[in-house]
Image (cartoon, rainbow, N blue to C red):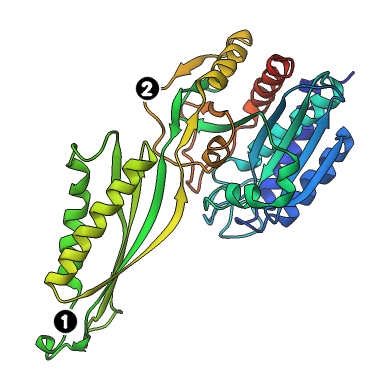
């Protein structure tokens, strides 16, 4: 019988091939087919394709009653130009795996290997390769797909590699693990004028400057929010480059984050009121467009307890997080419906940050992720 550490080189090769052929959110066609071809050797009981357009689920049935455990890996890359020299550098200049989803998929493929080598005796296991996590749309698309109705897990799990923490460490937290967030594009519309006669127009620039300065101060209203909230201005533009025209339109974007969803909505309402009041003062129209909504990823304490036990059994360093991560994860959509948990897998204290052009997934932690997931199956499939 082949051992998992003997199979790691093949998983690393797969990870590099996935990295080399990075695909953007919602278009992971080659990625899905590559994973499917690779995992057919592990003889899943069933395969569900095109979940949420490009997603893939491998099903391992025991034939006996028991719990259904689902493990998710994300598939999409980021619109970030890669600037590291490797034999497997992304073939697409402005698209690359800078969040480690290639490594997450390799971990799940390694779990498929173990499920073939050591079949489960009760219940079933679902390995879900999910599209479009980076945009917050993928989990929703999978859950809305009629084909997902046949899966219906009792528990769901996911991991994310986390730079800045010791390699192979396991990061856990009850309740909120990653924050809710959304982006808002705010447009202010006035009236353009010749730069020689600015008084004949209504420029949105003074209002935009005022709002860019004042909106971040909304988070200091502690009596409104129950937990942590954050607001950051990420983009601003007025008119077009030139010297002859006073602009009639301006737009700027903000990102909102909150530990809990209701606080995110409270912050949104405060923004709406401030923008409307300011726009009216300057005789402007205001328009809002919301982007990439992410629910908070809220861990079930019982499920987190199962993760702790596995980490302790393998003698992995267990780190209890005091605060949730400020970034967002659409795995929260699954945990809204099914008891579940996400945990962090330390990528190295000095490892490159996520979402940077010089990041690359550390292959050394693939085996750690596999052992964690399989340990969970060992403990809960008979529960």
In the rendered view, tell whether residue 178 sits above or below residue 282. above
Q: Nearer the viewer, residue 355 or 331?
A: 331
Residue 377 placement: quadrant:
top right
Q: Is residue 231 above or below residue 243?
A: above
**Is residue 372 visible in the rendered structure shown here?**
yes
Circle 1 SS class: loop
Check the image and report above or below for 331 versus 187: above
Measured from the top left, where is residue 121 in percent x and y? 83, 18
- Quadrant of the rendered structure where residue 229 is? top left
Which residue is disc 2 drawn over? 322
Q: Residue at the spot x=41%, y=33% of the render?
A: 325
Residue 179 or residue 18, whichever sits in front: 179
Q: Position of residue 118 (x, y in %)?
A: 84, 19
Residue at (18, 48) in percent of width and height: 217
Q: How many marks?
A: 2
The quadrant in which the N terminus is found is top right
Between 106 and 74, the one nearer to me in the picture: 74
| Residue 308, percent from left and from top | 55, 15
Outermost residue on the left side: it is 199
At a point 67% along the width and 53% down the height, the residue shown is 52
Badge 1 local density, few (<14 within 10 Å), some, or many (20+)? many
**125 to the left or right of 304:** right
Query: Is 376 positioned to the left or the right of 81 in the image?
Result: right
Q: Is residue 26 above or below residue 35?
A: below
| Residue with the mark numbered 1 | 202
Q: Is residue 87 visible?
A: no
N-terminal of the pair, mark 1 or mark 2, is: 1
Q: Secondary structure at mark 2?
A: loop
Instruction: Name the quarter where the C terminus is drawn.
Output: top right
Instruction: Give the residue displayed 70% in from the left and 36% down from the top.
Output: 106
Residue 158 point in image, percent of width and height = 60, 32
Residue 113: which numbered mark, if any?
Answer: none
């Amino acid at each position: 019988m082949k051992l998992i550490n003997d199979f790691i080189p093949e998983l690393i090769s797969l990870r590099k091939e996935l990295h080399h052929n990075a695909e953007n959110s919602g278009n992971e066609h080659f990625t899905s087919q590559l994973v499917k071809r690779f995992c057919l050797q592990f003889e899943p009981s069933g395969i569900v394709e095109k979940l949420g357009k490009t997603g893939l689920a491998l099903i391992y049935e025991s034939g006996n009653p028991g719990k259904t455990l689902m493990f998710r890996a994300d598939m999409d890359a980021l619109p970030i130009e890669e600037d590291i020299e490797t034999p497997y550098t992304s073939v697409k200049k402005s698209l690359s795996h800078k969040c480690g989803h290639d490594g997450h998929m390799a971990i799940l493929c390694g779990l498929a290997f173990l499920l073939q080598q050591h079949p489960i005796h009760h219940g079933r296991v679902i390995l879900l390769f999910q599209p479009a996590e980076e945009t917050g749309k993928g989990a929703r698309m999978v859950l809305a797909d009629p084909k997902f109705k046949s899966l219906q897990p009792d528990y769901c799990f996911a991991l994310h590699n986390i730079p800045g923490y010791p390699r192979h460490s396991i990061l856990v937290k009850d309740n909120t693990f990653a924050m809710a967030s959304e982006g808002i594009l705010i447009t202010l519309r006035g009236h353009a004028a010749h730069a020689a006669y600015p008084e004949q127009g209504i420029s949105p620039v003074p209002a935009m400057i005022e709002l860019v300065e004042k909106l971040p101060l909304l988070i200091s209203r502690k009596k409104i929010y129950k937990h942590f909230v954050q607001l950051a201005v990420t983009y601003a533009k007025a008119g077009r480059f030139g010297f002859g025209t006073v602009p009639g339109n301006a737009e700027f974007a903000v990102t909102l984050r909150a530990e809990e969803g209701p606080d995110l909505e409270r912050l949104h309402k405060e923004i709406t009121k401030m923008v409307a009041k300011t726009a009216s003062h300057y005789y402007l129209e205001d328009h809002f467009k919301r982007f990439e909504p992410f629910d908070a990823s809220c861990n079930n304490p019982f499920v987190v307890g199962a993760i702790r036990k596995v980490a302790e059994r393998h003698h992995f360093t267990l780190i209890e997080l005091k605060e949730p991560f400020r970034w967002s994860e659409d795995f929260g959509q699954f945990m809204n419906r099914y008891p579940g948990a996400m945990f962090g897998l330390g990528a190295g204290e000095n490892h490159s940050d996520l979402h940077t052009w010089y990041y690359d997934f550390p292959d050394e932690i693939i085996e750690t992720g596999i052992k964690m997931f399989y340990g969970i199956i060992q403990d809960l499939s008979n529960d």
